Image (cartoon, rainbow, N blue to C red):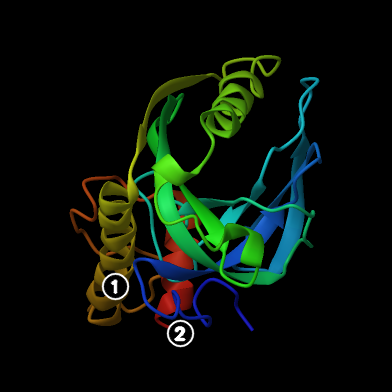
Amino acid sequence: MNLWKDIPVGDQPPILLNVIVEVVSGSRAKYEYRSEWEAFVLDRVIPSSVVFQVEYGFIPQTWAEDDDPMDIMVLSYEPLEVGCLVKVRVVGALIVEDEKGEDAKILSVPVNDARFDGYQNITDVHPHRLREIQEFFETYKRLEPTKWVKFKQWIDLQNASLVVQKGMENYLKMARIYRKSSCASVKESICPADFLSHDLNVDTQTLISELIE
């Protein structure tokens, strides 16, 4: 099973979502799901003296502006497992800018943990908890040459849901355009298209070819 394209977005998107965990809280090991291999690959071990403050992963059947499935954070009292599926409720999002451009990281809570029943919006998360998360993302790349992150803002549930909706639309648009493509082989040649106002990189081409198989 391909965890990016074969699992639905969620029960009631863009609020109630499915999340595939790639990195667990308390860890420096940053795994990424490689859709073409259907496997989790160790991308790197964070060189800074910090650990992930949240469970971190992606939302299936979404596509973000940075040419990757949409990032999402999950608050949890216990570290989960790499590769597990978590049903979550969106409460807001962190907006940062890095060396690749603006990046939205959705913030969510598990729906199957009663400790988070009262979390409905970003204002329900303790301000210090938000500062810890912000501090992590501002510092975790500092010892990596050419990489950097700048905090921009936290946004509330309403605006975060619009970001998720856009990611869902991007995925559907990508699938629709390339399923109808007249190219003989997407793996060999990508049809000209102004897709998401970006030039398609190699990884994006590989994912698109999977969509139409």
- Alpha carbon distance from label 1 to label 2: 15 Å
**Residue 172: which numbered mark, if any?**
1
Sequence-first tag of 1 and 2: 1
Task: Label 1, secondary structure: give it.
Answer: helix
Residue 138 appears in the rendering? yes
The kind of residue tagged 2 is Glu
Quadrant housing residue 187 = bottom left
Residue 104 appears in the rendering? no
Q: Position of residue 41 (x, y in %)?
A: 75, 55
| Residue named by callout 2 | 213
The kind of residue tagged 1 is Leu
Q: Position of residue 55 (x, y in %)?
A: 67, 51
Q: Position of residue 101 (x, y in %)?
A: 37, 30
Q: In the rendered view, does 41 fall on the left or right side of 12?
A: right
Tally the marks.
Answer: 2
Q: In the rendered view, does 5 fall on the left or right side of 179?
A: right
**Residue 147: which numbered mark, if any?**
none
x 51%, y 30%: residue: 127
As displayed, is residue 158 above or below residue 86? above
As displayed, is residue 184 above or below residue 21? below
Q: In the rendered view, does 92 fall on the left or right side of 27?
A: left
Q: Nearer the viewer, mark 1 or mark 2?
A: 1
Work out whether residue 157 or residue 162 is closer to the camera in this orientation and state it. Answer: 157
Mark 2 closeness class: few <14, some 14–19, many ≥20 residues within 10 Å: few
x 56%, y 69%: residue: 111
